[in-house]
């Protein structure tokens, strides 16, 4: 992808750092802008950009609109090209640009119980939560060891476990960086890792939690225990725990509330599925290759 000039990064930093508590959570974009994780920055014009698109390697992206009346053609061409590489999730700033963006994308309105179907662009809602320390203290689960069950801090061996859908290796360059930037905690039964809570992004003294529980171990409260261990560590080290998820992901939202997180902001959230390259594009690639 194209990389914007230093001027683009300078324009983005006040937005992506989200120092204002009322701002939406975009730590994933901050991580790219600050060079902490892999990704890229696309601009329609390096000297005077109207659109800046921050792409995190995990597939989360942020479109920042600097000129809402600008020509949409370059943006449309950019989305058409990038979607031939992979599916992406798209957040938007400011929200007022949503009608023009949806017209460009021809977005469907996804039913609240709909999952990304991989066929058409869908509009979801992303919920940002604010951590309430008092609520957490009142709700914090107590660890009660059971036979064969353990709670332990994650090590390099859990960085990229097979069979884990959402894993730390999708967010960080290597295990060393992951452990330096917050690491995580896991609940195990015997030798099997059942659930994990880990640092998915970290910036500006804020740590965003990532959570994954193997299907066969769900419904046992393991995710809540793992999250509580990571939250305790955040509080002990001066980091603010951060939680965001799709509103349609009811389980994640309920877990957040059970841990003392309070919904604070809802924003539009788009899923753009991967599209096949045209015959002409494939032919051109074959010739150039």
Image: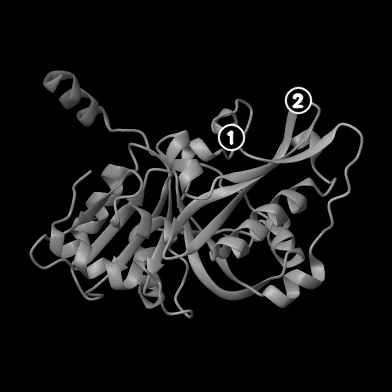
Structural crowding at the residue carrying mark 2, measured as other residues with C-alpha within 10 Å and reported as few (<14), some (14–19) or many (≥20): few
Read off the residue under disc 1: 155
Q: Residue at 43% x, 41% y: name it.
A: 177
Q: Residue at 33% x, 43% y: name it.
A: 38
Residue 240 appears in the rendering:
yes
Quadrant of the snapshot with the C terminus:
top left
Relative to 13, is 243 on the left or the right?
Answer: right
Which SS class for mark 2?
Answer: loop
Up/down of 156 relative to 15, above or below: above
Which SS class for mark 1?
Answer: loop
Disc 1 + disc 2, Cβ < 8 Å: no
Read off the residue under disc 2: 191
Relative to 135, is 123 on the left or the right?
Answer: left
Visual colour scheme: one colour
The disc, 1 or 2, on the residue closer to the chain's N-terminal end is 1
Question: Residue 195 placed where, x, y %?
Answer: 72, 40
* Residue farthest to the front, as pictured: 236
Question: Residue 21 placed where, x, y %?
Answer: 48, 79
Q: Residue at 60% x, 46% y: name it.
A: 184
Up/down of 56 relative to 161, above or below: below
Q: Quadrant of residue 48?
A: bottom left
- For marks 1 and 2, give the one nearer the viewer: 1
């Amino acid at each position: 992808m194209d990389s914007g000039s230093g001027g683009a990064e300078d324009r983005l930093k006040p937005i992506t750092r989200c120092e204002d508590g009322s701002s939406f959570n975009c730590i994933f974009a901050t991580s790219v802008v600050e060079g902490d994780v892999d990704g890229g920055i696309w601009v329609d014009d390096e000297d005077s950009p109207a659109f800046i698109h921050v792409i995190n390697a995990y597939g989360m992206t942020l479109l920042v609109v600097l000129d809402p009346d600008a020509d949409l053609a370059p943006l449309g061409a950019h989305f058409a090209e990038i979607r031939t590489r992979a599916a992406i999730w798209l957040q938007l700033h400011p929200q007022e640009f949503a009608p023009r963006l949806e017209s460009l994308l021809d977005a469907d309105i996804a039913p609240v119980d709909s999952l990304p179907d991989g066929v058409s662009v869908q509009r979801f809602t992303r919920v940002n939560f604010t951590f309430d320390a008092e609520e957490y203290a009142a709700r914090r689960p107590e660890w009660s060891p059971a036979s064969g069950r353990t709670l332990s801090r994650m090590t390099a061996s859990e960085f990229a476990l097979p069979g884990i859908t959402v894993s730390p290796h999708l967010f960080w360059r290597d295990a060393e960086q992951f452990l330096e930037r917050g690491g995580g905690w896991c609940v195990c039964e015997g030798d099997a890792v059942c659930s994990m809570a880990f640092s998915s992004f970290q910036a500006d003294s804020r740590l965003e939690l990532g959570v994954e529980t193997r299907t066969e171990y769900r419904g046992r409260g393991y995710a809540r225990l793992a999250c509580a261990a990571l939250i305790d560590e955040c509080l002990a080290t001066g980091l603010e725990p951060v939680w965001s998820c799709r509103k349609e992901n009811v389980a994640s939202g309920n877990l957040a509330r059970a841990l003392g997180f309070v919904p604070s902001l809802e924003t539009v959230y788009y899923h753009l599925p991967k599209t096949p390259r045209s015959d002409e594009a494939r032919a051109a690639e074959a010739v150039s290759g």
